[in-house]
Amino acid sequence: MFRLKLIPDNSSFPFLNLFKFGFVFSAILIALSVGSFLYQGLNLGIDFKGGILIEAKSKQGSADVQRLRAELGEMSFGEVSIQLFGAEDEVLIRIQKQEGDEQAQVQVIKEVNALISDGYTVRRTEFVGPTIGAELTQKGILAVVSALAAIMIYIWFRFEWQYSIAAILALSHDVISTIGFFSLTSFEFNLATIAAILTIAGYSINDTVVVFDRIRENFRRYKSWEQNDIINKSLNETLSRTVMTSVTTALALIAIMVFGGPVLLDFAAAMLWGVLIGTYSSIFIAAGVLTYVALNRSGDDTADIPKPEFEE
Amino acid sequence: MLQFEAWKRLVILIVCLAGLLAALPNVVSVPFYPGKSVNLGLDLRGGSHLLLRTDINAVVTERLSDIAEGIRISFREEKVRFKSLTSDENSVSFSLRDEGDASIRDTVLSEFDDDFVVGTQAGTTIIAFSDSGFLELQSRTVEQAIEIIRRRLDPDGTKEPVIQRQGVDRILVQVPGIDDPERVKALLGRTARLTFQLVDMRITGAEAKSSGRVPPGSVLLESASNDGQSYVVEKRVMVSGDMLETASAGFDQNNSPAINFSLNSIGAKKFATVTGSNIGRPFAIILDNEVVSAPTIRAQIFANGQITGDFSIQESNDLALVLRAGALPAPLTVLEERSIGPGLGADSIAAGQIAAIVGIILVIFYIVLSYGIYGAMASAGLLVNLMLILGALSLIQATLTLPGIAGIVLTMGMAVDSNVLIFERIREELRRGRGVRDAIKAGYSRAISTIMDANLTTLIASILLYIFGSGPVRGFSVTLGIGIITSLFTAILFTRFLIVLWINAKKPKTLVI
């Protein structure tokens, strides 16, 4: 019977030899991410920066971005960005936070609406005032930090502290490089991005836990083996599953990217990046770090491996 | 035979049945069926989301100014001489010229209850809101504002807007299915305080403006239309909007839009008295501190009148509506707005559906290629999972947003993980030389602790997302969280049941998974 197997049975990749390349690659990745973040920062969306976003669809024919740019440029709203959005007849207009209070912002929305209402239908208006922007930023940072902390505590309970450290290193690696991804690509960083980062964290830790579970189990199964050989074997044993799950998740994400419309495009792209980096990090960072610490072979017996009873 | 306990079969049956019943209204509409379909978020069905702040300081300032006026009148009646009676946004203060009037002062001040802090130091009396009084005023203001907003946005009670207090002084407004979000803001943008005050004839608006002097007891107001005119009107309010019985849009004798109103009995009596004794004087109609018009009183007017001004038909309609609904107790500021037109919402639903269908087909294709008939069983689990998510969303009436749809598609990808873990385990057990049934049993029991660990961590992330997220992001976390729970059910119980049925029926000698 035919079976599609991307990873052959009994695979034996020499992961131990690959770890050093992984570390170098990750070091470059993190350096690039941090550098880009410091140098060019993030393309913050209005959720965090405050400002106005208007999506409009041309009533007839394709949208004339040049003309809109000229017309809106005359209005002295400060920085105005206009780009096609998803289709030829749709534009996304972003207007920076206006001087003055919230009333001033609402006034601008009114003026833009009046200006474009002849040729365009306004499909979406979003406006975030400075107060809310600051609150959302705070909440976003809190969400990511507390998620990392909660996951670390969970791993600590279920495994031992060495695993917890390795997992949190891998997670931080994913979060930093995802933020770096957003900085380098200039994708808009908004509320949905925070959701993407947390989901990536969840996905990555999921992967890491599967590898850790296997390492712990193999410690008990192969009592005389070297620690590094056990880690290598565990990675190979779980590799088929890792690839399988990554591919199914990636397929779902590609479907969202291609068919989910422009609103979800950035979100899905970020998630796809996260699936790749999360899979990579659970092998090369999480497991890689474990080769440098001495693990307790006996483990605690409360978190034991299940021993199935075989009837018949 | 592989065992599968009866109670587990029962659980599977009940959960699937419940899921089917709960999900049903999303697919077909059954008459008299009590279930509800999924609650679509504003980003999918179109509508306006507004976060408003009530400007409590304006209310406090106004109340304190009223109190100062009250004290002024009381002292005049009692012939008490006083100086520097002023009010600002924090307090009212004054001093007596003659301390011999202290007992009268104390009688006047005894009217102030716990809502205020009253104190006299070095001859100066200060009256301010106490903390509890301020909170009380704030609560009452926000609640009144919510009531007025409801009457303005939903006069017929048909639109089901969400209007909720959030935090201390904020109000969340969500109006589904509107075409023109600007109109919502226009309806909420004015407090609509309507008053009728006599015009002060001693000085013209222009004179007052250039000299900067306004006679005591009067105030200088601008015209509502942009004609640059200004008026000096008496501070005393003769008739106010809360005495309106009704208001409707109509036309004046020149056929331009106007508002017809009628007053309740108290208002009518006052109106008749004032107009009767002031024939020939202009009577200013003032809306939110701007003079709409100041017609000269030609004859005594009783209950019915007309407000003319520079209105469009839409404006006169809206103005009549907000006058009927009553004045807001405080001005509202828009802190956040997210409005989606109905067209975009429909497009998003269509895009989300296509993405979901394509995503599921791709995933099913891949797992069937990888695990054959067992992959098909996992796929059946996937479809049941989808049904359960839909059912759960309908049951708890959670809001499905566009990111929520993304969450479902993502769950489809990740839900397979549990099955993959199990199948890979079974493969391993087979390679170690176990028999068919042993391999299946060992595969399941060994994989479960891994599955639990892996899913619980994702669940933690989704719960935090719910706690800290807002709007559409919350929708995403809800579907992700529900998806994790339902996928545990389908992987551990449903798909396993299918496999047990298959093995027991076919009794294969070897297992190719």
Image (cartoon, helix red, strand yellow):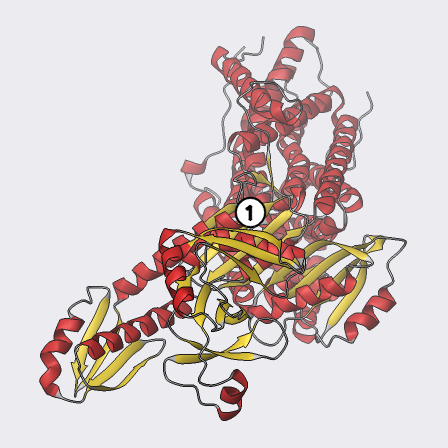
Residue B445 vertical placement versus B455 (above, below): above
Residue B405: x %, y % from top left: 66, 40
Q: How many marks?
A: 1
Pointer 1: residues within 10 angstroms few (<14), some, or many (20+)?
many
Q: At which x and y percent is residue B395?
A: 52, 29
Q: In this view of the protein, which residue sits in the foreground, B439 or B322?
A: B322
Q: Quadrant of residue B319?
A: bottom right
Question: Residue under mark 1: which chain is it in?
Answer: B
Type of the residue with mark 1: Arg
Q: Is residue A232 visible?
A: no
| Residue displayed at 70% across by 49% down | B341
Is residue B170 left or right of B383 when viewed as pictured?
left
Left or right of A169? Residue A6 is right
Q: Is residue B32 visible?
A: yes
Q: Residue at x 49, y 92 (%)?
A: B211
Q: Which residue is mark 1?
A: B474
**Considering only vertical position in the picture, is A29 above or below B153?**
below
